[in-house]
Image (tube, rainbow, N blue to C red):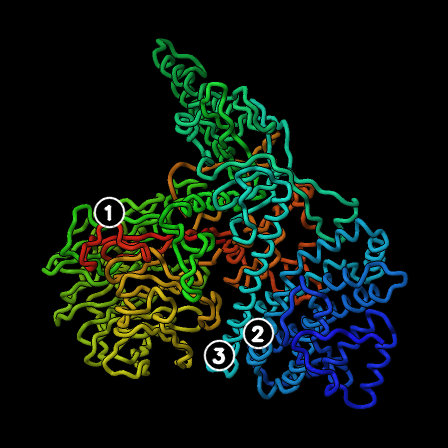
């Protein structure tokens, strides 16, 4: 008898085999003489190995799976959870919570049933089939880790049944999710499954092609099932599971009142599940990135890609687009699918070759093979927008030449220098209308010189002709604009002509939807920024020995500039704010490359009594100074107050708040001064005039200002908080502004009020080492201590979800507190997050600024360095669990402020409507103007292209709101689109992966409101601005720019980081 080989370090089998039954099992397995028998022997030997304790990988010997204990769960001993009949006297929220609990029970039961179907209907029959359909070595990688996932959820169902049985007395379930899914073993098995998923699908596809018996087996299993779901449809369910849990817990939290015993556990559960989903999402993204790059590399011989390493993560974006060739009159000459790859420094276009049986795609995603079509260095690729052709042509002419170029290059039938506004046919029609208008205008002038009077031939009729042509021109421009929304036109360098002159050709890609085009333009723009010196590298990992991080996925330093046009070393910046102003003149595509719309206000002052406000326009890729406002006193803080929304009356319409026809004040900016007064300015789009002054006779500098819906709060150095109410009446009487006579004062103590934070109806105000919670209406207070040292005071407070992060006047620690229970939840020491922040000379690291933006906690230090730490984005507790990053671009002095700016593109611009009829109506093209525009962070699910993996990325969750989970396939076409244009990497069945309402086995949510639908299509642009003295690069042996020799001086400098668009 041959015994199974013992692994290195494996203990002797003798102490393990106890009892006659164990010996009989061992002998029976060994006597079988088969490989399966030896595997069963190994299972019997290793019974004492705890479940999921060993970390294996799919690439290792499949026998490694034997180290996991398979525990059978009997439904007799452990019946599935069943909710008891609803008792009487429940509140409406309790009723809703019971319904949500029932959905959790049903969803988990359905999920477990799907997992067991895979094991019982596919895995076991394939292993026991005679003759063999597939060898065991091929079967095990396909079903890798499914048994362990089933075991995890079997244990969860047992615990769920116990909790459901006592629901009416406890009504608590959040802690159960935390206990069940916060364990590292859950992440391990799900990570292995997710990372192996693409490989499993590839094995199934290969087996279907090479083993007809296996293909017949899959067809028969699908045909015999009641729901007709495929093996792929079953195996993708583990990838869906955590977004479904998040949806249900979000709704449970919404219906859990404050003070409920389950509220904090639910928030913690959301945090754990979101963190788990984000980790799985990132691992899946990296796995698909490597798979796509390897697939492309097999067919690429281009020198630009010869050094491409799939493991380095250089793939930024890839998507299947439609390349279309148009004739001079706009007719479609050719249209074909291409796979476009955006790497960190090169753009690649490849042909898609799909091989396999025609019915294979209905059973498993068919991964295509690629053939290189062309590639180009990224810095030489230009997005050609409306009206830019002439400027492009001056430097890189792209008229046709005799040299070889792609067969599908865009025929440049129109002359260089003329504006090509869209599809050639539409542009030609627009040119004809403009020509006719010029002639009619001339005729109008001639008609005016007629001596006689004639019917239907006079100046009035001629002017009507002109107005009619103007209307037709506007309609044609709207049609071009609509068509431009989905057309991506790229100017790509070709081979030089015979004279050596550089030649470029135009390539036109049709994107599935407007969001896809915007995302492509944005990613191309950011990829070029990432190649700049200050971004290569721009960040280092704080906990891996300062290892540089690739630019993709990190905030990119878009620009840096001095605050003042004239050097002012005696001035110091004190605060900044973003004044969002939507400009209707900004174009569609400009939102992809510009900073957030609006204006940046920067407050500064010197040692004397003078101050100044600098205003910069952000409606372009680089801020531009537009106005400077001198002040008689040094400003210390700024607050942006949006125009108040009028309350609705009983009829559902807005209630009148002033005299009929009285205009509103609009958005305002409040400026807190060192002398205790507050200045109220109008927005920049209303000339930035000072509208009101709120004096404070008692003096005391205004250190911070925050506004609530009807009140303005000002924290003073004297230890008090001033509260102002709004005025009544029209603008002439100060309507919608703050009423100086309504001022009330709340004394908090002798310590300065350095920070304020508004939380719904409450206001948190710092007072030394404590925080006072002020009720906004009654002004009653509650104090709680946040730091043990009485000499330390709270300097900064920021909120995310159900927690508030605080930084202090001394020390390098930041602390997290719960917004409802005021409980201290976490403490992080910034100095230990990186070797760049520790060591000799850095023992007195101090936090000087704090900011939360799109799932990152930004921390500025008194030494000029900036750190970001990942935090959850949902309604959970913003605990820090991931690794931080340290920016290699730093200030020479303290980071005086960190500011987040964001703006959204108008939703109507994202609607693909009003498309013209004819050959150009299938897709649109580029649009907008050469002006500039537009949290969540959006790879953006719900409409944009996939990041680094095309439609193969199944874990692209959208975790900002309940309406977005688990998300849609980001390259999905709109409703009614032709199925022939869909990517070939997924079948039609895949819609259930992303739409929970399409899955009959999942709890169905109510139809979303129109407001939620509009939010789903919103594109948000975001940037982070830091202010401080000087600029330097860390770890480069010296400072750059204007840093002084002593290291502490320098010019006041702004640094602007641009973030990817979110949807």
Q: Nearer the viewer, residue 1030 or 411?
A: 1030
Q: Nearer the viewer, residue 733 or 227?
A: 227
Q: Is residue 130 above or below residue 666?
A: below
SS for callout 1:
loop
- x, y percent for residue 1018: 48, 52
Q: How many marks?
A: 3
Tell me: 130 left or right of 190. right
Q: CA distance from mark 1 to mark 3?
A: 47 Å
Which mark is on residue 200?
none
Residue that label 2 marks: 184
Label pair 2/1, CB-CB below 8 angstroms: no
- x, y percent for residue 66: 73, 73
Q: CA distance from mark 2 to mark 1?
A: 57 Å
Rendered-image quadrant of the N terminus: bottom right
Which mark is on residue 264?
3
Q: Is residue 855 above or below residue 440?
A: below
Residue 96 seen from this side: no
Circle nearer the N terminus (2, 1): 2
Residue 199 seen from this side: yes
Label pair 2/3, CB-CB below 8 angstroms: no
Q: Residues within 10 Å of mark 3 (few under 14, many from 20)?
A: many
Q: Is residue 160 above or below residue 649?
A: below
Q: Nearer the viewer, residue 386 or 725?
A: 386
Which mark is on residue 687?
1
- x, y percent for residue 655: 38, 60
Q: Residues within 10 Å of mark 2 (few under 14, many from 20)?
A: few
Residue at position x 83%, y 90% in the image: 20
């Amino acid at each position: 008898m041959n015994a199974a080989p013992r692994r290195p370090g494996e203990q002797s089998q003798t102490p393990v085999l106890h009892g006659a039954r164990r010996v009989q099992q061992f002998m029976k397995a060994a006597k079988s003489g088969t490989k399966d028998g030896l595997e069963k022997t190994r299972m019997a030997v290793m019974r004492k190995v705890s479940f999921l304790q060993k970390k294996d990988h799919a690439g290792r010997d499949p026998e490694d799976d034997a180290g996991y204990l398979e525990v059978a769960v009997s439904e007799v001993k452990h019946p599935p959870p069943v909710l008891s009949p609803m008792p009487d006297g429940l509140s409406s929220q309790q009723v809703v919570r019971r319904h949500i609990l029932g959905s959790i029970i049903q969803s988990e039961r359905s999920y477990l049933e799907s997992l067991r179907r895979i094991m019982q209907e596919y895995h076991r029959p394939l292993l026991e089939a005679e003759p063999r359909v597939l060898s065991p070595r091929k079967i095990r990688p396909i079903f890798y880790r499914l048994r362990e996932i089933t075991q995890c959820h079997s244990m969860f169902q047992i615990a769920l049944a116990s909790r459901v049985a006592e629901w009416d007395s406890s009504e608590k379930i959040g802690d159960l999710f935390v206990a069940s899914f916060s364990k590292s073993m859950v992440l391990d098995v799900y990570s292995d499954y997710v990372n192996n998923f693409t490989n499993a699908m590839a094995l199934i596809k290969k087996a279907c092609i090479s083993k007809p018996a296996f293909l017949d087996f899959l067809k028969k299993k699908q045909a015999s099932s009641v729901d007709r779901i495929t093996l792929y449809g079953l195996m993708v369910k583990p990838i869906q599971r955590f977004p479904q849990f998040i949806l249900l817990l979000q709704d449970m939290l919404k219906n859990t009142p404050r003070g409920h015993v389950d509220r904090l556990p639910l928030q913690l559960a959301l945090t754990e599940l979101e963190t788990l989903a984000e980790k799985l999402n990132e691992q899946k993204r990296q796995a698909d990135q490597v798979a796509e790059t390897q697939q492309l590399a097999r067919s690429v011989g281009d020198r630009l890609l010869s050094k491409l390493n799939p493991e380095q993560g250089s793939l930024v974006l890839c998507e299947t687009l439609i390349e279309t060739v148009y004739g001079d009159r706009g007719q479609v000459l050719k249209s074909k699918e291409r796979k476009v790859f955006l790497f960190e420094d090169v753009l690649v276009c490849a042909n898609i070759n799909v091989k396999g049986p025609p019915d294979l795609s209905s059973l498993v995603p068919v991964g295509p093979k690629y053939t290189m079509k062309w590639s180009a260095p990224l810095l030489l690729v230009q997005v050609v927008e409306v009206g830019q052709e002439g400027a492009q042509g001056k430097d890189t002419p792209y008229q046709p030449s005799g040299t070889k170029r792609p067969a599908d290059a865009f025929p440049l039938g129109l002359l260089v220098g003329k504006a090509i506004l869209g599809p050639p046919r539409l542009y030609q029609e627009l040119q004809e209308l403009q020509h006719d208008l010029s002639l009619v205008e001339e005729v109008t002038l001639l008609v005016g010189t007629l001596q006689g009077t004639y019917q239907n031939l006079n100046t009035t009729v001629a002017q009507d002709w002109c107005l009619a042509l103007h209307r037709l021109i506007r309609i044609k421009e709207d049609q071009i604009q609509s068509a431009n929304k989905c057309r991506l036109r790229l100017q790509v360098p070709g081979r030089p002509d015979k004279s050596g002159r550089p030649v470029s050709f135009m390539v036109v890609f049709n994107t599935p939807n407007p969001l896809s085009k915007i995302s492509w333009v944005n990613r191309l723009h950011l990829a070029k920024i990432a190649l700049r010196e200050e971004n290569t590298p721009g960040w280092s990992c704080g906990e891996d020995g300062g290892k540089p991080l690739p630019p993709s996925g990190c905030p990119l330093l878009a620009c840096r500039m001095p605050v003042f046009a004239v050097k002012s070393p005696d001035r110091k910046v004190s605060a900044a704010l973003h004044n969002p102003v939507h400009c209707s003149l900004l174009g569609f595509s400009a939102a992809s490359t510009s900073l957030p719309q609006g204006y940046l206000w920067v407050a500064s002052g010197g040692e004397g009594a003078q101050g100044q406000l600098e205003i910069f326009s952000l409606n372009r890729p680089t801020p531009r100074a537009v106005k400077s406002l001198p002040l008689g006193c040094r400003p210390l803080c700024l607050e942006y107050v949006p125009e108040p929304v009028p309350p609705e009356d009983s009829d559902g319409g807005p209630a009148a708040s002033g005299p009929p026809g009285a205009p509103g004040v609009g958005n305002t900016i409040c400026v807190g001064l060192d002398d205790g007064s507050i200045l109220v300015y109008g927005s920049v789009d209303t000339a930035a005039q000072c509208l009101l002054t709120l004096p404070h006779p008692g003096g005391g500098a205004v250190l911070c200002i925050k506004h609530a819906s009807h009140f303005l709060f000002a924290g003073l150095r004297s230890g008090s908080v001033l509260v102002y109410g709004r005025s009544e009446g029209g603008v002439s009487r100060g309507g919608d502004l703050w009423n100086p006579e309504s001022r009330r004062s709340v004394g908090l103590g002798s310590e300065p009020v350095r920070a304020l934070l508004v939380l719904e109806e409450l206001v948190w105000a710092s007072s030394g080492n404590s925080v006072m919670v002020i009720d906004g209406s009654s002004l009653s207070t509650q104090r709680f201590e946040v730091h043990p040292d009485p000499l330390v005071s709270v300097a900064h407070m920021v909120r995310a979800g159900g927690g508030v992060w605080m930084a202090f006047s001394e020390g390098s620690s930041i602390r997290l507190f719960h917004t409802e229970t005021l409980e201290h939840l976490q403490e992080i020491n910034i100095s230990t997050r990186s070797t760049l922040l520790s060591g000799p000379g850095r023992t007195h690291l101090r936090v000087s600024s704090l900011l939360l933006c799109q799932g990152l906690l930004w921390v500025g230090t008194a030494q000029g360095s900036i750190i970001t730490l990942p935090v959850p984005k949902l309604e959970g507790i913003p605990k820090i669990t991931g690794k931080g990053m340290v920016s290699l671009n730093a200030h020479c002095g303290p980071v005086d402020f960190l500011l987040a700016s964001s703006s959204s593109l108008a939703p109507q611009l994202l609607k693909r409507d009003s498309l013209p009829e004819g050959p150009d109506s299938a897709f649109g093209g580029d649009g907008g103007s050469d002006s500039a525009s537009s949290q969540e962070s959006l790879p953006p699910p719900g409409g944009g292209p996939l990041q680094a993996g095309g439609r193969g990325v199944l874990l692209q969750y959208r975790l900002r709101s309940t309406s977005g989970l688990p998300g849609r396939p980001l390259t999905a076409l709109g409703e009614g689109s032709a199925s022939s244009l869909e990517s070939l990497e997924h079948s039609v069945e895949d819609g259930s992966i992303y739409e929970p309402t399409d899955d009959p086995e999942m709890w169905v949510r109510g139809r979303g409101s129109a407001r939620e639908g509009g939010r789903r299509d919103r594109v948000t642009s975001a940037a982070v601005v830091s202010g401080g003295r000087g600029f330097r690069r860390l770890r480069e042996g010296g400072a750059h720019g204007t840093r002084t020799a002593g290291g502490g001086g320098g010019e006041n400098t702004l640094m602007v980081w641009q973030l990817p668009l979110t949807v």
